[in-house]
Amino acid sequence: MLIGLALMPFAAVPAARAWPYLLASALVHTVYFALLMTSFRLGDFGQVYPIARGTAPLVVAVLAAVPAQEVPDGTAAAGIALCSVGLTGVALWELRGRRPDWAAIGAALATGLSVAAYTVLDGLGVRASGSPLGCIAWLMAVEGLAVPACAVWRWRRATLSVLRPHAALGLLGAVLSVTAYGLVLWAQTRAEPAPVAALRESSILVGAAMGAVFSKERFGAPRIAAAGPLVMGIGLMPYA
């Protein structure tokens, strides 16, 4: 929210036709935050994160074909499919030899659907806005109101004391988040949403590696093998 407010003086206000998409996206982002935190609470980071992110590219391809009339050609479709196979493989290997946690998996799948929904909304909104930077600034400011409001409602006068120890890490995460998603929005002004979504989710391998390093979760040969289709899918994207 603070970063969005700081960007506003340097960017044009989005065009009127972009505001329905922007407001709808802010609402979906709020639902996404809640679902993602629920997923992390219920399951391992290395399992739920790939499921949440890996389901998005295929759903984005379907959703974008309806309102945006953008259907990937054969090469792009093959790249998206290969990326999705690799991303799904990163997650599914974790289910071997143990009973699936269907609550965590369900929350992760719901998170993936919310990712697909806001990706398509933002792709339509940024193109209609006439100002990618303005769209980023206003989207971050509007959607950024929800989580602080929930925190104040939950902690009341203790909010600042609860948040103070995490302020530096939170601000660093905010800068990384705004920068990363700003690049995604800018990319959607140059390319169709589905390939952009598939390329974006290549970070799942990084997430799986971080889960292994920081949370001591297994990585293993199956995840390494799943990286093969992902890399091939990424390789097909520039030729779409």
Image (tube, grey):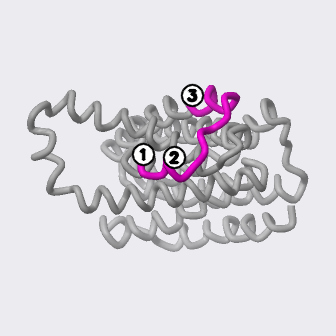
- Does 93 sit above or below residue 55? below
The residue labelled by disc 3 is: 24
| Picture quarter with the C terminus | bottom right
In the rendered image, residue 41, in percent from the top left (x then y), is placed at 30, 44
Q: Which residues are magenta?
A: 5-22
Q: Horizontally, is 200 left or right of 130 in the view? A: left
In the rendered image, residue 148, in percent from the top left (x then y), is placed at 29, 37
Q: Regarding mark 2 in the picture, which secondary structure is present there?
A: helix
Foreground of the two, 93 or 72? 72
CB under 8 Å between discs 1 and 2 = yes
In this figure, what is the number of numbered marks?
3
Task: Tell me the amino acid under the disc marked 3.
Answer: Ala
Nearer-N-terminus badge (3/2): 3
User: What secondary structure predominates along the stretch shown in magenta?
Assistant: helix
CB under 8 Å between discs 3 and 2 = no
Q: Residue at x 15, y 53 (%)?
A: 164
Foreground of the two, 130 or 43? 130
- Does 66 sit above or below residue 178? above
Foreground of the two, 48 or 198? 198
Q: Residue at x 68, y 39 (%)?
A: 129
CA distance for labels 1 and 2: 7 Å
The residue labelled by disc 1 is: 5
In the rendered image, residue 88, in percent from the top left (x then y), is placed at 59, 54
Q: Residues within 10 Å of mark 3 (few under 14, many from 20)?
A: some
Q: Horizontally, is 18 left or right of 4 in the view? A: right
The residue labelled by disc 2 is: 137
Q: Residue 15 in magenta?
A: yes
Q: Residue 96 in magenta?
A: no
Q: Residues within 10 Å of mark 1 (few under 14, many from 20)?
A: some
